[in-house]
Image (cartoon, coloured by chain):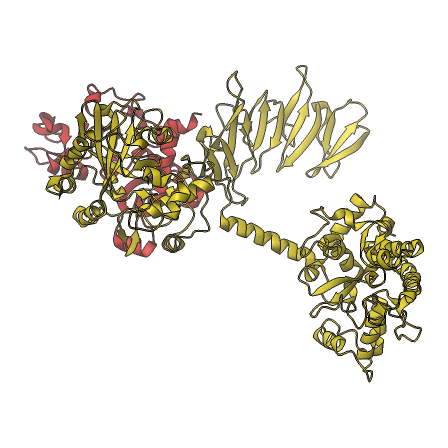
Amino acid sequence: MSECRQEQITCPHCQCNSPMTVWESINVTLDPEIKDQLLNGELFRWKCEICGSEAIVPFGTLYHDMTNKFMLFFSPWDDENTQPDESIDIPGKHLCKGYTFREVFGINHLREKIAIFEAQLNDIAVERMKFFLRLDVANEILPNDELYFLQVDTSAKLIEISGWERGAINFIRIRDGKESDVLSYKMEAYYDYLLAVKMDSRMCENQCSCVDENWMKTKLQTM
Amino acid sequence: MYFYKKVGDIGPFEICKTDYHGDNVGLRDRSGRWVITPEMGFQSFSDYDDGLMVAYRRTDNGGGFILVDYHGNCISDVYGYIKPANEGYYIVDKGVRQNIMRRDGSLVLKDWPHYVGKVRDGYFHISNTIRKTKTTPTRYIYGIAHVSGIVVFPMIFESVDFYDDPNDSSSYVKQNGEPYCVYDGAIYDPQKRHYPSTEKKLDIDKYINQIINWILPGLQFFYRDTDADIDVEKMYPIGKVLRTGFNTSVSAKLQQPAQKTRFLIAAAHAAKLYSEEDGEVNEDGLYLSPRAEEWQHAVLSKNSWLKVLDVYKVGDVTQVFMIQIPETAAQIFEDNEVLFNFIDDYETEGYTLVEYARKSLNEKMRQLVHPRSTDRDFISLMWRPVGYTLAGTPYSIEPDYSLEEQPLGRWSNTPENNRHLNTRIHWLAGDRDIVHYYDEFPWRGIVGTVCDGCMYAKGTNGVPNGCGRLFQKTFRKNYIRGVCEFWKFSIKEESDFERDTRCKKEREKEFKAKTSGAYAYSLLYDFIDEHLHGDINNLLKFDFNTLFNSEKYGPIKGPTVIPNFAIMRSIIEVAFGDYWPDLNVETLDNYQYQIGTIINFHRLAGARVAHRRFMLLERVLPDPRLVDLAENLHAQCNTIGDFIVWPNKVTMANMFDDHKMRGYIDRLFIDIYDVMTDAKKQNMDVKAALYKNRKMMKNYQGKDGFIAFMKNALLDDFINEDGSPKHLFDGVSINAKDFKLDLLPGALRQYHDFMVPTIERRSQRIVELLKERLNLH
């Protein structure tokens, strides 16, 4: 079940203390409504009970999905300097058979990881795919573009139009000063990357690490 | 100011050397200005690329190669060797290891492999050598890297090659003997085994009836007794589903078991090799197993699935009772309660199947041991425990499409024999899976179909959407008709399609070569080198009979006679190709033209059966002088001058060997002349032949045409000065009614005296003609 505690936050305007619910862990299987609040940022929103001013108060939490068997140790600060180099050691991990553990930094990465695991995909294969999509200049993904997994589209309409029998894997590209756009690739491409991950022993991750672009780059630089 | 001399060019510069600086060289630009002076100590420059080049500089430590700019600034460290790697990168050597270097001198890889390949679109191959040990040979492992410094795939492959298309950076790789394609950091299995099936979830109830109707009708007990060590509890727990794994022989009739374990198999789809009592003789079964009748021999194919229903022990004998189920039941409904409750509750003669099986053993135990239960060959055939390997492990439930099963009886273990056996067993058993409909296509799996045993079968992934070789449409077409020209057992074998394609390509290539003259000229050049010691004059005495067994120069099509030899057809094409429309080896192969001979002495001397032995002369006039003449004539036969080419829409080559012309070719020329000049009296056979061959004879019409025909064929000796044909011989023939023995010596001498020198002269002229055509003067 989800666990929370109350914290007193001092209002930057009136200097009065007001309570805020800080969730230490969120079990989205048991408390699905909290998931929506987390993903739309509502959970981090704090309002001063005295003066009514509002502020965003980010906090780290454990995201637990029992249905899809994954746990995400979420930290809202998406800053390289705040990210630890070592993976988290999880006590009793052996009891959670079939679970995937990940560290996640930043809300966008959290959204992405949730989408990946809920779509029953392998996040390492998705990261590998993203890495090589960036590497191929033909895809026109700039170094500062943010690229996140969006969804797997297996709608009959798409399959009929595109002829992509297994549907499409969609990514969202966020570029400064431009509207976000969606990049679609054949789902078969994902399976090709998944096979690559299975064959490449460096792509194995049993610890609780932050599997992102940097992780992928580090792994790929080893021989 | 140096006194210098130019020793070479590189890019926009001249490499120059002076008298003052030993081996050192420098670079001067087009205006004569030194851009790199010899004092800088370089001994060579190479591989100029956009301002950078590889230079060699000797040092106290032995020297090495450096990347320098055109001011002589060293861009890189010193390496054992530097060579361009395409796309502005360089391969650098350090000891036995290599790396890729960028234009700024930085290295791409942190670790140095033993080998790096050239760069293609940013990607390059890397390799390491694993030295041999006492037990393993030297091995090479391959990987793929990128110029950004990442190792796309570590060295996990047995081989790696770029695609043939130079603009494609994808690679073919092999791992554990399986081919894959690597592209953009992903890897693709051509057999598509890594793609999840697109099959929709099965509606179980829909298949229950089909499965029951597969299992129960025609259900019959089969027996297999063995004394093999079997832990029944572990190996055959009730409910376990097994695949037989090998072609499992069973008997339709046994009595009391003579061995300690009896497999009682209830099967409706066993291949019965024996004849039914009221049926016809089972020829197919007897072909597979000659003792089928005696043993009541039946076979469950290696891809048969059995479910253990009961284990029952009477005395020392343990009976394992199993029932044959279809593939779908084994794969998907392994523990489906509805299905197996139905089977458990199925009653025959008031007993459930298990009760009936137990009753069977109880009754058998009261019977005598059947003699076949003690037959050594029979015991050996039945020895292996059902569903287990020789090592004692159960076979995988997944079907096995390989053809590695030892065939029955005396058959040798080859893929062809095994495929044939496989096909026959499935045909006799009728054990193909139940039908699954995919967009109305009736799919019954791979086992027992045309795809069984094919290396591409795994590519179906259990659905009829194509295989490892074919797309859906062709795959389904071949599946239904039961014939597939793409079937192949292994990558080393050739499928029918591949063989046909190869033969077609070879035929096209051959056709092109034969019609273009390339084949004839090339063969003739080779022939002169290989058989005439480089001198075409040796063709005059060459005995073509020595080429009977030559694949290259000998018979290529038609009966094994010299005119059908490749070399003879090539000679005719080269010598006479200009005088006949489309005369070449191909049209000779297709009998549009035919090569005939001029000499025909059989009607004067008879057949030559041995040296100096001519049948006719020996019989009627054994005069050694006549034999000499006949031998001389024989010596000219099959020399190059004896051969003549004829159009062959209607055969003309042997037209003169009939009762009218009596084997004398001069008579044929006279008749041809008569037809061409529209004489009053004409030989109608010759006229018809010339008419039929009119397209090829289009350049040979009228008297002038006849003269041209004779001259082009180098038959000038057969015509008079005015171009009319000579009447050369009296026409004596042993077969003729008017034959008189006293005329024979004169006739033979007459024939000899004309033919021998004429053929010799003609041979010489043909050789001269060939020299001219082949530029051998």
Taking the spot 41% from the left edge, 34% from the top edge, the residue there is: B406
Residue B185: horizontal and vertical position, in percent?
Answer: 42, 37
User: Horizontal and vertical percent for residue B62?
Assistant: 67, 17
**Does residue B149 appear left or right of residue B738 in this picture?**
left
Quadrant where the N terminus of chain B sits is top right
Which colour is chain A painted?
Answer: red
Looking at this rendering, what residue extends furthest in the bottom direction?
A: B680
- Residue B489 lies, with reference to residue B555, above or below; the image says above
Q: Which one is in front, B375 or A130?
A: B375
| Residue A47 position in % (x across, y down) | 10, 34
Q: Is residue B646 left or right of residue A5?
A: right
Residue B222 x, y percent position in the rendering: 26, 38
What is the drawing colour of chain B?
yellow
Q: Tell me which residue sits at (19%, 19%) in the image.
A: A92
* Residue B172 appears in the figure: yes
Report the front residue among B30 and A12.
Answer: B30
From what the image shows, is residue A58 above or below residue B202? Answer: above
Question: Is residue B194 visible in the rendered structure shown here?
Answer: no
Q: How many marks?
A: 0
